[in-house]
Image (cartoon, rainbow, N blue to C red):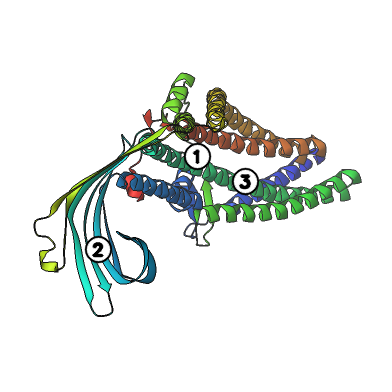
Amino acid sequence: MTENKGIKRNRKKLAWFVFAQLFMLMLFQPVNGQDVRNLTLNQAIEIASMRSPDALMAKHRFRSSYWQFRSYKASYLPSLELGATLPEFNRSIQQVSLAEGEVLLERQYSEYSMNAYIRQRVGFTGGQVFVRSGLDRLDNFTDTTTVTQYLSTPINIGYSQPLFKYNSFKWEKRLEPMKYQEAKKRYLEDMEQVAITATNHFFNLLLSQIREKIALINQANYDTMYKIAQGRFNLGKIAENELLQLELQYLRSTSAVEEAKIDVENKLFRLKSYLRIQDDLPLVLIPPSNIKSLKIDYTLAREQARQNSSEAIAFERRLLEAEEQVNMAKMDGRFDAELYAVYGLTQRANDFDYVYDDPLDQQQLTFGISVPILDWGVAKGKIKMAQSNQELVQTTIEQEQIDFDQEIFLKTARFNMQYKQVVISAKADTVAAKSYEISKARYLIGKISITDLNIAQAEADNSKSNYINSLWTYWSNYYEIRKLTLFDFENNREIRIEFTNLL
């Protein structure tokens, strides 16, 4: 009879303990009708891509690259310039050549001029075509009179061409489009990095919230078990050492609750700050459950990375820039020649009404050369330095390409095995939680010691954290591979956007 009473009493205690557990679980769930913000991982990434500081900075960096490219394109369009001198006054003593020889004369005059230019760069040759039209007026002042003369240039057509100089226009034409494509790819990579950062903030907070719930449940559990142990100790059924251990665990669980709350507040602030969420609604994070057994082929990943990554374009650009420096060293400071030719019409008159009548031909042709005779090897030294740097760049890029392929391989391998890790950790979480519930029930009826219960509780807590960490690693690896390859493996297509929407 006494044994039956003991069993009934233990069953009542167990029923009360289960009721307390259910009450705690209900306490941590959002109440119906309460204003909360449910947030999934995809929603967090979407908000971050629109609002986060990293996304906004990436947009402004791309805009800067876009306008740099537009400026380069505009530099090859005809430019119109207007210049004027209104007026230039000069009163001075000047040396003038006359038939009698050099004499000093006092001169007083004012000059007015207006000129319009149309210029056009010729990128392939490095030359320039220009068209000019202008009008000048000169007023010579004497003691008694003012003599006015007009000089008109209805039209001048000219061309200037350096023959053996470094042609920056030719290299710009090859490099600038490449830089713009690199900027596009870098923006896409920046947005994938935004997804990675948002994922880290999301799971940081999710893990902290779960640890807080575990700490609260553990606190409630140890509070209940400590009270039960007090009754059992008073009845002489347990030793004082076991009661003290439970009291110590309860105190530790209370301290863990306070630390967990602070950690949650810190992680919540970081996530809201990154997503720029202004309201004070509680965030309820929903872990991603749609994990797919996605296998990424390394060969495909490497191919897409070499084709889409900004690093691949940067490799080509850096090699081209090194080649440009060699060309510049070879051209500058060596034999040089320049051709300058102008053909046009001109006329002069003392009256403005006749300054455009019967204009005369005007021709000008200049061909100049510059040949260095002795530079003590300066030019040769610059060429050798540029060639050495070109070889260094080529070697560095070859090694970086190997390291880049290795990174693709490691990221792919880690992602492919991570799905299995998620499945294992989910199963381990379920098993550990069930084991802990059984251990609690057995402890309450006196079948196991407090040490065994603590071990079961620690395993359950760790299993829950390990499951969230495995989810975290899965999604982080996924977005890191997307960043490296700019390829959506889930939908089997390249990652593209409409860049005009960013301007």
Q: Amino acid at mark 3?
A: Ile
Secondary structure at numbered mark 2: strand
Residue 426 spot, x, y in % from top left: 58, 32
Residue 64: give x, y in percent of width and height.
42, 49
Q: Secondary structure at mark 1?
A: loop
Q: Vertical placement of 176 versus 316: above or below?
A: below
* Circle nearer the N terminus (1, 3): 3
Q: Nearer the viewer, residue 344 or 257?
A: 344
- The answer, for residue 18, to whether it is visible in the render is yes
Q: Earlier in the sequence, mark 1 or mark 2?
A: 2
Q: Nearer the viewer, mark 2 or mark 3?
A: 2
In the image as oriented, which residue stretches furthest toward the front? 100
Q: Residues within 10 Å of mark 3 (few under 14, many from 20)?
A: some
Does residue 424 appear to the left or right of 367 in the view shown? right
Q: Calculate the distance from the C-alpha at mark 1 to the C-alpha at mark 3.
A: 15 Å
Circle 2 is placed at which residue position? 114
| x then y, percent, for residue 210 | 62, 46
User: What percent of the width, then of the height, locates residue 100?
Assistant: 32, 60
The residue labelled by disc 1 is 288
- Identify the residue at the far left of this view: 358
| Residue at left offset 21%, top offset 70% | 148
Under mark 1, the amino acid is Pro
Give the labeled residue for mark 3.
210
The mark that comes first in sequence, 2 or 3, is 2
Quarter assignment of residue 162: top left
- Residue type, mark 2 in image: Met
Q: Is residue 409 visible?
A: no
